[in-house]
């Protein structure tokens, strides 16, 4: 029958692809390698810049949220629901168009529950972090952000069998040191947000939020390494929209009625939505080329960018320790990749030796190996690349 033939064909193609990937990986890893080699690759610079782009996105969303709060509009769940709607419009449409409704339905039935858990953790991470800012001061909430990094390292180590090299640990510690200097200078200047409404309550919310974030990042890294990026984002948009919508309807009803609605508020909401959608679209690439841990330490510079925006927009004064802290964090991000492999962290331990369980999408070691094999005429022709 036809069905059997096509199945045998696909097994043959899979086998040929695995052979090609294996060849490509061997070729890439056989090149002469120095401890600093990864720093000379395009990948390193791309991932460093993408990390800072994400950091700027976080700063921009925080700035929009501050503007909204200044108008008396504090709607943590509601203001994010638009982002999920936009993600659905873009990625759900594209995925259903690419797969056809039948195939998408099958995936929804088979993997829907896993994606639901991912979206649920993602929504709660956002929600509790925003909620924490209501009860505790900024300094406290930012200190607790470190917990997300600890979470990611522990979960990656236990669940994904990631083994950290000494330079990675040193890099993470240097980044945390840089962040520590930022927080210390905030404290010295007294810009830590002053007295809090209910410190303990806020800190517990922040801890809960950071834990959800940590879990989300590791799960998402696992997903985007195995599935096309647009599929993952389509489900995050779809489920995020539903979960967030329900949450907004339950918890934000009162603050929604008390909120100020005018053109400026609408403008800030549009800005917030666009920036956050861009953020969600870039994250998968960083998780593929690098990892959840690198992604989290990249975001530590958001404070620095936040201050730069603060100087211009909110009229803050800069403290001399800020630039030192920023440089320290960037140094930490660089040290993280010292003495790694030439593939950096794009070769994922849970995908098998030849990354056979992985997707050949942008930023993956599998695609890089296939391209290397193709150049040497080793790869099967007509292999489709997924995003």
Image: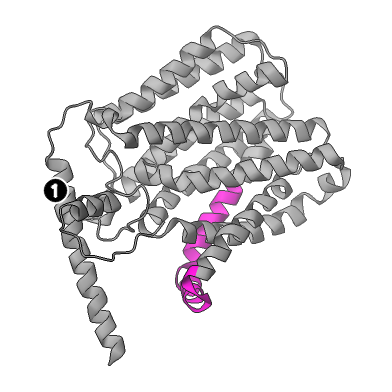
What element does badge 1 sit on? helix
- Tell me the chief SS of the magenta region: helix
Residue situated in front as seen by the camera: 227 or 152: 227
Q: Which residue is mark 1?
A: 26
x and y percentages locating residue 247 in the rendered image: 70, 55
Image x and y of residue 243, in percent: 64, 58
Check the image and name the residue furthest to the bottom. 1
Which residue is located at x 19 percent, y 68 percent? 15
Residue found at x 60% / y 50%: 123
Q: Nearer the viewer, residue 241 or 288?
A: 288
> Which residues make up the magenta segment?
98-124
The image quarter containing residue 303 is: top right
Which residue is at a point 53% across and 64% down the rendered structure image?
94
How busy is the neighbourhood of tag 1: few (under 14 within 10 Å), some, or many (20 plus)?
A: some
Q: Quadrant of the C terminus?
A: bottom left
| Residue 112: in magenta span | yes
Question: Is residue 41 found inside the magenta-colored segment of the image?
Answer: no
Q: Quadrant of the N terminus?
A: bottom left
| Residue 134 can be seen in this image | no
């Amino acid at each position: 029958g036809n069905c059997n033939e096509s199945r045998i064909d696909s097994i043959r193609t899979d086998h040929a692809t695995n052979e090609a990937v294996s060849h490509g990986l061997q070729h890439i890893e056989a090149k002469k390698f120095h401890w600093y080699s990864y720093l000379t690759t395009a990948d390193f610079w791309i991932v460093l810049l993408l990390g800072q782009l994400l950091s700027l996105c976080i700063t921009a969303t925080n700035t929009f949220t501050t503007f909204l709060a200044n108008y008396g509009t504090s709607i943590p769940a509601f203001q994010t629901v638009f982002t999920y709607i936009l993600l659905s419009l873009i990625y759900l449409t594209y995925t259903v168009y690419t797969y056809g409704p039948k195939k998408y339905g099958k995936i929804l039935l088979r993997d829907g529950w896993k994606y639901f858990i991912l979206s649920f953790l993602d929504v709660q991470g956002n929600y509790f972090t925003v909620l924490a800012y209501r009860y505790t001061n900024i300094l406290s909430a930012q200190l607790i952000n470190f917990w997300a990094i600890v979470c990611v390292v522990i979960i990656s180590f236990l669940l994904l069998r990631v083994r950290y090299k000494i330079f990675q640990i040193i890099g993470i510690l240097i980044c945390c040191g840089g962040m520590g200097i930022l927080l210390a200078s905030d404290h010295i200047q007294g810009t830590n947000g002053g007295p809090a409404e209910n410190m303990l309550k806020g800190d517990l919310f922040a801890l809960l939020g950071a834990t959800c974030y940590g879990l989300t990042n590791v799960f998402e890294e696992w997903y985007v390494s195995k599935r096309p990026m647009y599929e993952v984002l389509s489900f995050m948009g779809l489920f995020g929209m539903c979960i967030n919508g329900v949450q907004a309807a339950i918890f934000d009803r009162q603050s929604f009625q008390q909120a100020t609605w005018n053109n400026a508020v609408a403008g800030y909401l549009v800005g917030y939505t666009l920036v956050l959608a861009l953020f969600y679209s870039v994250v998968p690439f960083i998780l593929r080329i690098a990892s959840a841990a690198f992604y989290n330490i990249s975001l530590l510079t958001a404070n620095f960018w936040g201050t730069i925006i603060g100087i211009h927009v909110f009229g803050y004064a800069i403290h001399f320790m800020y630039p030192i802290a920023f440089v320290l964090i960037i140094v930490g991000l660089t040290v993280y990749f010292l003495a790694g492999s030439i593939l950096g962290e794009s070769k994922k331990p849970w995908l098998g030796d030849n990354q056979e369980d992985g997707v050949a999408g942008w930023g993956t070691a599998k695609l890089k190996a296939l391209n290397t094999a193709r150049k040497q005429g080793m790869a099967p022709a007509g292999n489709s690349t997924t995003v």
